[in-house]
Image: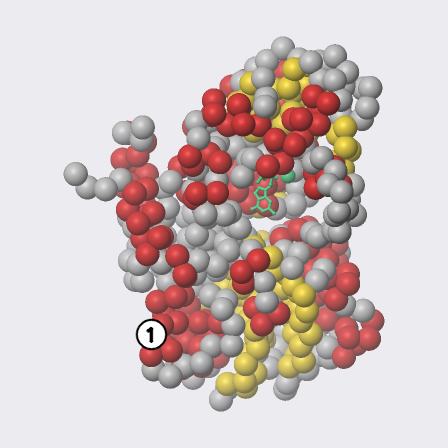
Amino acid sequence: MPPTPRDDFDALAREHRADRFHDECGVFGIHGHDEASHIAYLGLYALQHRGQESCGIVASNGREHTAHRSMGLVADVFHEKNLNRLEGRHAIGHVRYSTAGASLIRNAQPICVNTDGGPVAIAHNGNLVNAGAIRRELEGRGAIFASTSDSEVVLHLLARSREEALEDRLIDALSRVKGAFSLVCLTDDALIAARDPHGFRPLSLGRLDGAYVVASETCALDLIGATFVRDVDPGEVIVIRRGRLRTLRPFARQETEYFCIFEKIYFARPDSNLLGHNVYAFRKELGRVLAREHPVAADMVTPVLDSGTAAALGYSEEAGIPYETALIRNHYVRRTFIEPAQSIRHFGVKVKHNAIGGFIEGKRVVLVDDSIVRGTTLVKIVAMLRNAGAREVHVRISSPPTTGPCYYGIDTPTKEELIASGHTTEQIREIIGADTLGYLGLEGLRQVGEKEVKRGFCDGCFSGCYPISMHAGETVPQLSLFRALEEEPER
Ligand code: 5GP
Ligand code: MG
């Protein structure tokens, strides 16, 4: 019997474990503005939710690059002095988050090199599934890599390309990589933006005072007062030089695209528009469908802030149950904090969330979140609601069970760590201590998704249907797998 797509992919993924870099990132680029580095800083500020570990900006004065990269948040890393040092009318920037293993300053982006064609810097969002294979091949021929990031292979391939113009060398490099890329590239005088043919990650184009701007999300355009022009198309390469925009389509447009549905469910900011549709409205709609799929008699609907907010509102409206913020969130929590030696029960989660005492007493609560990863958040929050006197706690999740990792740029842990990969919904309900647990069904998600994402999306983390294989050069014919799976659902 042939392996199911899921088994086949897992075997490949295990084999290529070392190639998996879980980068969550945001990118920004601006061309032709007197305050380029300052605008890039603001753009990154709006994209901070896409990566909180390191950030960087590279600016070009038309001849040479200056860069500043550091671990930390945009607001902490940049100040007037180092921004003023980033001279020139063109700049790109990056925010990055990765799991501990690869959390190194040498992995911070943009990555800069000097080539025989001048300075080149790139900032990349997404994950290249064949980066490891290409890297081994290049290392076998003497290449030396400075980081452990998958993005660096693009620069190596670019430097080795026999093409003349830097944009052609970049295209040459990108034609060899497989997976997800929404990237911006800065040369001495040009800004280049490119999106992989499958369109996994978002990338939008805007204009500001005659300058061109590209950003992972439209919320960055809003902050700087830029007007939205359009999304960069999957497979498109945009070259901006001397105030002129040229669009190239070197990669054949795919019949099916694979926009990441998790961007819409959780990752993107609710005020952004993805593929022309508002993220907040999408999440509310998921909440409405969730209410129809998993109704329950209750006194209030409350979100796990902030990620569950829009879905909880949709659930509340559809179910006719009042929306309350019964849990308050501290917005100033950093990723690490000093724990008291004498351990306080559930200290970690209490730093971030607290139930409003008295308010919940004797109430039946519907608790809404966007997803369950390891389950640790909900174990603690359900207990917190019970300690506050909740009579019943009904957990509702506005996405299907997360059963597999993401190979294209979302920081989900390994399959073993995902609670839904080894447990049934009933077992998870028991572990988190809820009275009932309801996940949005895959069908429900796909129906809402198809209304906005007309050319297809990737829901591999829920369905196990991964569009691009880990094998270098091999693309799984996703369309037929997709259909086969739908006709013959997995048990
Ligand atoms: P858990 O406690 O189950 O491990 O994590 C669940 C929480 O993590 C949810 O509230 C969800 O909003 C959030 N979450 C889901 N996916 C991601 C992700 O890829 N990155 C980060 N930083 N948080 C996530
Ligand atoms: Mg959350």
Relative to 338, does residue 121 appear above or below in the rendering? Answer: below
Question: Which residue position is annotated with label 1?
Answer: 137
Q: Position of residue 109 (x, y in %)?
A: 59, 68
Relative to 349, does residue 203 appear above or below in the rendering? Answer: below
Q: Position of residue 409 (x, y in %)?
A: 50, 54
Q: Quadrant of residue 235?
A: bottom left
Q: Position of residue 308 (x, y in %)?
A: 65, 33
Which quarter is ligand 1 in?
top right
Image position of 167 (left or right of 141):
right
> In percent of the image, x 65 and y 26: which residue is there?
382
Where disc 1 sits, the SS reads helix
> In percent of the image, x 50 and y 47: which residue is there?
413
Query: Is the N terminus in the top left, top right, bottom left or bottom right quadrant?
Result: top left
Can you tell me whether the CB of the residue at mark 1 lies under 8 Å from the nearest atom of ligand 1?
no
Query: Is the C terminus in the top left, top right, bottom left or bottom right quadrant?
Result: top left
Residue 50, visible in the rendered structure: yes
Q: Residues within 10 Å of mark 1 (few under 14, many from 20)?
A: few
Of residue 206 and residue 71, the one placed in the foreground of this image is 71
Residue 479, visible in the rendered structure: no
**Amino acid beneath label 1:** Glu
